[in-house]
Image (cartoon, rainbow, N blue to C red):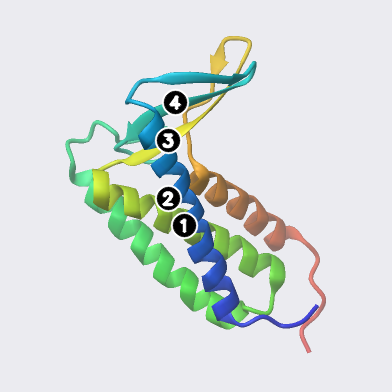
Amino acid sequence: MPARNIKSWLWLAATLIMADQISKWIVLGALQPGDSRYVAPFFNWVLTFNRGAAFSVLSDAGGWQRWFFTALALGVSAWIVTLLRRHSSEFRLSLALTLILGGALGNVVDRLRFGAVVDFIQWHAAGYYWPAFNVADSAITVGAILLAWDQFATKPPRR
């Protein structure tokens, strides 16, 4: 597999941010907060604003969490860019980091624009509903899974 440079990964992160923001723009134009649209027996479109982190952690903390999560995401993003500079030729690790980077910055855009993250994807089964999420959240989740896989996968010895 050919070595990649950091620019390829940063372009992928930027593409992810754009896809996330376009999907949110579409949902914001089609739904009002609290609306729910049936898509399939296990899937709805909804529009919610999450002022907290994953699973609405700290969503009712009074407003300081907006800036805390924004600063945290920007700090982690800067760290990820440094890691990408060092490891841009390691495909799985760089893909994982890029997904996390794009997702984190996609949600930062929301926090800066709306003071909260726009969530709109809702999975459900047998009367149980998973908390709503978005494209950025999905990228972060897949990136975290890939990162864990990369850490436990057998790697060839470095030369």
**How far separated are the C-alphas under marks 1 and 3?**
14 Å
Dot 1 and dot 2 residues touching (CB under 8 Å): yes
Give the side of residue 140 with respect to residue 152, left or right.
left
How many badges with numbers are in the image?
Answer: 4
Residue 2 rendering spot, x and y as whole percentages: 77, 82
Q: Which of the two labelled residues, at mark 1 and mark 3, occupies the earlier sequence position?
A: 1
Q: Which mark is residue 46?
A: 4
- Going by the picture, which residue comes out furthest to the bottom? 159
State whether residue 144 is above or below residue 131.
below
Residue under label 3: 27
Q: Label 4 sits on what residue type?
A: Val
Residue for badge 2: 21
Instruction: Say what amino acid the circle numbered 2 marks.
Output: Gln
Q: Quadrant of residue 50?
A: top left
> Is label 3 or label 4 in front?
3
Instruction: From the viewer's perspective, tell me whether residue 140 is left or right of residue 49.
Output: right
Residue at position x 47%, y 27% in the image: 131
* Residue 18: mark in rendering: 1
The front one of 108 and 11 is 11
**Residue 65 position in % (x across, y down):** 25, 45
Element type at marker 4?
A: strand
**Closer to the N terminus: mark 3 or mark 4?**
3
Q: Position of residue 40 (x, y in %)?
A: 63, 20
